[in-house]
Image (spheres, rainbow, N blue to C red):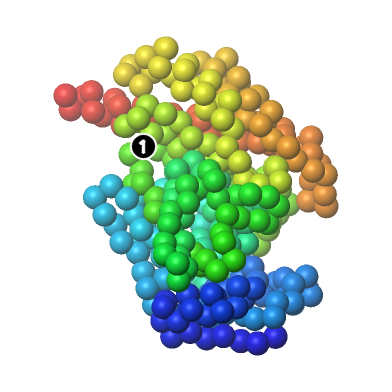
């Protein structure tokens, strides 16, 4: 196994063009596990730790540009107001040591359905900025996951950053594991309210071959909220609406039985998490709505 160590982003792109099978490594929290267990033995490893811009972030007027190697710990500590769903997901990642090393770019590159960041990125509607010597492009998160541990990157492309709209409403994240720490998700669920567009987005992890959205559940809830005037009146969502939303989220899953949980349990757990996160996010929205009405 050869080790490539570019000193700049331009060198990294050139190296990736010359060696398309090279596996990028920054935090190494996913790649090194696979290598240590002999699940992967790449011809080339490309160390990106000397490229400082990958660990930088920028908060714009409407969006956050998050470098691929920004650690989960930084997201938790510095970007919670702008990216609350991703910050909550970051809390569930492994141990403090791994949260200080691992970043969203690694999750995206590995594209495991159990990656902790994916449900939050789907719910937020992120875009992945990728680049090669041929140029750069942005891939909508809905188009990024193409199969089990496969993504839409071309062989010569590297992930440079993730662009995420700043939260304009409450976001939540929930994860089920076999223990309380250092655990791969049995299943996970992210939910984001977008009052600006009066829409709701979901993200489901570890309950299908790829991270997915529960689109039928979103369509149902979007229609129910609009028809009932909930965005304007801030009323409590009725139990029947919450239950139907949860059932549709569970139905969106296509899980497997494995050592961490059965398919039936995963569907059930996703339904429970969907109902709970909807309750939590809507209560937060109602609280903000009441405050606004009081001020007005």
Q: Is residue 57 visible?
A: yes
Spot occupied by residue 7 in the image (x, y as percentages of width and height): 43, 85
Residue 237 location (% of width, % of height): 47, 19
Q: Secondary structure at mark 1?
A: loop
Residue drawn at x 44%, y 50% is 127
Residue on which the image places disc 1: 169
282 and 201: which is toward the camera:
201
The quadrant of the rendering that contains the C terminus is top left
The reply, left or right, for residue 115 in relation to residue 290 is right
Quarter holding the N terminus? bottom right
Residue 253 at what x, y percent from top left? 69, 35
In this picture, residue 27 sits left or right of residue 149: left
Residue 279 vertical placement versus 178 (above, below): above
Residue 80 position, x and y percent, is 38, 53
Q: Residue at x 61, y 87 (%)?
A: 3
- Which picture quadrant has residue 187? top right
């Amino acid at each position: 196994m050869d080790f490539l160590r570019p000193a700049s982003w331009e060198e990294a792109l050139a190296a990736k063009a010359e060696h398309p099978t090279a596996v990028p490594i920054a935090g190494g929290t996913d790649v090194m596990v696979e290598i240590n267990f002999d699940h992967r033995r790449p011809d080339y490893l490309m160390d990106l730790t000397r490229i400082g811009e990958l660990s930088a972030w920028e908060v714009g007027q409407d969006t956050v540009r998050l470098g691929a190697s920004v650690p989960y710990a930084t997201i938790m500590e510095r970007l919670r107001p702008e990216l609350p769903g991703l910050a909550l997901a970051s809390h569930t990642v492994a141990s403090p040591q791994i949260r200080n090393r691992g970043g969203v770019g690694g999750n995206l590159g590995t594209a495991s359905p159990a990656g902790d960041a994916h449900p939050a990125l789907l719910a937020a509607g992120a875009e992945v900025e990728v680049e090669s010597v041929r140029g750069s492009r942005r891939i909508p998160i809905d188009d990024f996951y193409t199969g089990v541990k496969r993504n839409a990157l071309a062989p010569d492309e590297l992930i440079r950053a993730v662009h995420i709209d700043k939260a304009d409403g409450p976001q939540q994240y929930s994860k089920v594991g076999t223990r309380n720490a250092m655990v791969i998700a049995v299943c996970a669920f992210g939910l984001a309210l977008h009052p600006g567009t009066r829409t709701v987005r979901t993200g489901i992890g570890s309950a299908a071959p790829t991270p997915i959205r529960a689109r039928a559940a979103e369509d149902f809830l979007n229609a129910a909220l609009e028809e009932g005037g909930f965005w304007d009146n801030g009323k409590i969502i009725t139990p029947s609406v919450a239950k139907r939303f949860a059932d549709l989220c569970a139905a969106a899953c296509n899980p497997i039985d494995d050592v961490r949980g059965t398919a039936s349990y995963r569907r059930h757990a996703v339904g429970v998490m969907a109902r709970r996160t909807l309750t939590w996010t809507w209560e937060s929205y109602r609280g903000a709505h009441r405050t606004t009405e009081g001020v007005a």
